[in-house]
Image: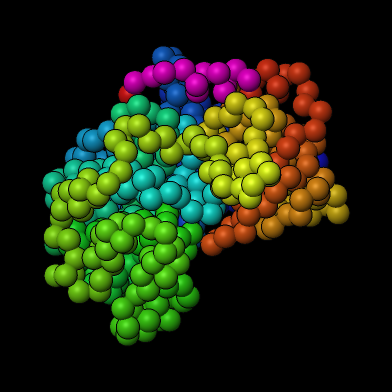
């Protein structure tokens, strides 16, 4: 199969790699595809600036509404400036369809980070919480409610100013306002938000919902950082019934090693009574800052520390408590998110997304688990040129957690050109930079 054909966007994608958007942005590779939009890495044809281009999916029934949703996102982002929120660079229309050009942030999704590592340390979770709370505080100051805070909408980068960046403002709304298209989406069977991260006061049309629904979603996100799971899963009706009953489980039930004060902050965020939650993101950030933790500017979420060492019996060497999959990496790596495909020897192809890359291999989040030692072919776009290649590879480990499993892929004999491009990308990403 021709690689370019295999990596072509699906029928629901309105654009393809190689097209020029708005007469100035060359689409270079597909970054991701969600329920409402598709995102490409692109380059301005004149000034060569790298950007991310977002356009709504083509849907026979909802395309017009998804266009309205993206226009709302453009309007929302135009009113919010903060180091933890992606910057808007440009916007426009292509034959009546909106597009949004944003700064291109090379990083890893928080959901991918949790999937790969299982759970985060307490001090890492505190950093995530403080930086997300500060970004959401800016959103609320602009009289907006995000309404879709969750790990998959959080990007973790190596930026020295902020590592945690809040994305996807597609269902953000002005406090107290209800758009007509929201009612249409509800009638069409679309849920505005993700049920696992929604409180009872955020469900339905949410006409009474305010910034405290974001406090709740942030609390669920921190719960997932610490435990690898959300408190409640299931269908929307099942979640509603569960939320209407007993209080949600505590972090301590899953992670008794987490400091009680941190577990208490999370617990106050996720109570169902909005009046019992923190009233603002400033209060959440202050509560987290009051905890015992290293300075957050010294906590690097993308660097995996050496595993802790246990005391050993007399006469025997101390051994690591845990050698997580990422600790075993032997090559310098850099965050790199792009759509990919894994081809099994039996011809079955699985959709995937890369999370980071090195000349030794990649970490992917895939739609199916793979067994250690399994030989596969990885089809992906290279990080600088965007050229699609198919590489021989071997599965080294798989971590099954909530959602799609994380898989460590080791390259086989890597050809010279892809190796040189990956080395160059990792070196570029390792350089100190400012935003």
Q: What stretch is highlighted in magenta?
A: 423-434
Comparing 299 with 282, the one in front is 299
- Residue at image coords 17%, 61%: 278
Q: Is 213 drawn above or below residue 169 in the view shown?
A: below
Residue at horizontal 70%, vertical 48%? 397
The quadrant of the rendering that contains the N terminus is: top right
**Residue 139 located left or right of residue 238:** left
Magenta: main secondary structure: helix
* Residue 334: % across, % down: 54, 30
Percent x, y of residue 69: 33, 53
Q: Do we see residue 355 in this rendering?
A: no
Q: Does the magenta stretch include residue 431?
A: yes
Left or right side of 154 for 290 = left
Q: Which of 361 and 303 is in front in this view?
A: 303
Q: Which residue is drawn at 21% across and 39% down?
A: 80
> Does 131 sit left or right of 427 as displayed?
left
The furthest residue to the front: 314
Residue 81 picture location, percent across and down: 22, 35
Q: Is residue 159 visible?
A: yes
* In the image: residue 22, left or right of residue 373: left
Residue 413: where, in percent of width, then height? 81, 28
In the rendered image, the quadrant that contains the C terminus is top left
Based on the picture, tell me whether residue 376 belongs to the magenta stretch. Answer: no
Q: In this view, does 82 lie above or below 282?
A: above
**3 or 288: nearer the eye?**
288
């Amino acid at each position: 199969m021709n690689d370019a054909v295999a990596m072509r966007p699906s029928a629901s994608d309105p654009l393809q790699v190689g097209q020029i958007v708005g007469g100035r942005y060359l689409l270079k590779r597909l970054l991701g595809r969600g329920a409402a939009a598709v995102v490409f890495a692109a380059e301005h044809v004149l000034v060569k600036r790298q950007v991310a281009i977002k356009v709504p999916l083509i849907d026979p029934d909802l395309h017009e509404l998804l266009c309205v949703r993206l226009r709302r996102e453009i309007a929302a982002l135009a009113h919010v400036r903060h180091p933890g929120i992606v910057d808007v660079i440009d916007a426009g229309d292509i034959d009546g369809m909106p597009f949004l050009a944003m700064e291109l942030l090379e990083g890893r999704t928080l959901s991918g980070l949790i999937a790969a590592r299982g759970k985060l340390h307490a001090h890492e979770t505190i950093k995530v919480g403080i930086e997300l709370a500060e970004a959401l505080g800016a959103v609320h100051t602009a009289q907006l409610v995000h309404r879709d805070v969750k790990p998959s909408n959080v990007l973790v980068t190596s930026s020295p100013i902020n590592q945690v960046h809040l994305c996807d403002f597609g269902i953000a709304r002005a406090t107290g306002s209800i758009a007509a298209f929201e009612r249409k989406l509800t009638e069409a069977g679309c849920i505005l938000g993700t049920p696992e991260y929604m409180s009872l006061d955020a469900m339905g049309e949410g006409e009474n919902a305010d910034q405290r629904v974001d406090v709740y979603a942030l609390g669920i996100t921190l719960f997932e950082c610490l435990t690898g799971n959300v408190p409640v899963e299931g269908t929307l009706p099942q979640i509603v019934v569960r939320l209407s009953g007993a209080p949600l489980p505590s972090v301590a039930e899953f992670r008794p090693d987490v400091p009680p004060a941190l577990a208490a902050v999370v617990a106050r965020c996720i109570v169902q009574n909005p009046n019992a939650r923190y009233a603002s993101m400033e209060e959440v950030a202050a509560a987290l800052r009051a905890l015992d933790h290293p300075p957050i500017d010294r906590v690097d979420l993308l660097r995996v520390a050496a595993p802790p060492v246990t005391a050993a019996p007399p006469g025997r060497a101390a051994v690591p408590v845990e050698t997580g999959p990422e600790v075993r990496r032997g090559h310098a790596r850099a965050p790199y998110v792009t759509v990919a495909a894994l081809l099994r020897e039996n011809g079955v192809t699985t959709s995937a997304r890369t999370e980071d890359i090195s000349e030794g291999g990649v970490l992917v989040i895939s739609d199916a688990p793979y067994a250690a030692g399994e030989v596969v072919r990885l089809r992906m776009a290279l990080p600088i040129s965007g050229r699609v290649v198919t590489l021989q590879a071997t599965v080294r480990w798989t971590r099954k957690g909530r959602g799609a499993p994380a898989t460590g892929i080791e390259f086989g004999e890597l050809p010279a050109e892809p190796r040189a491009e990956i080395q160059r990308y990792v070196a570029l990403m390792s350089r100190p930079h400012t935003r």
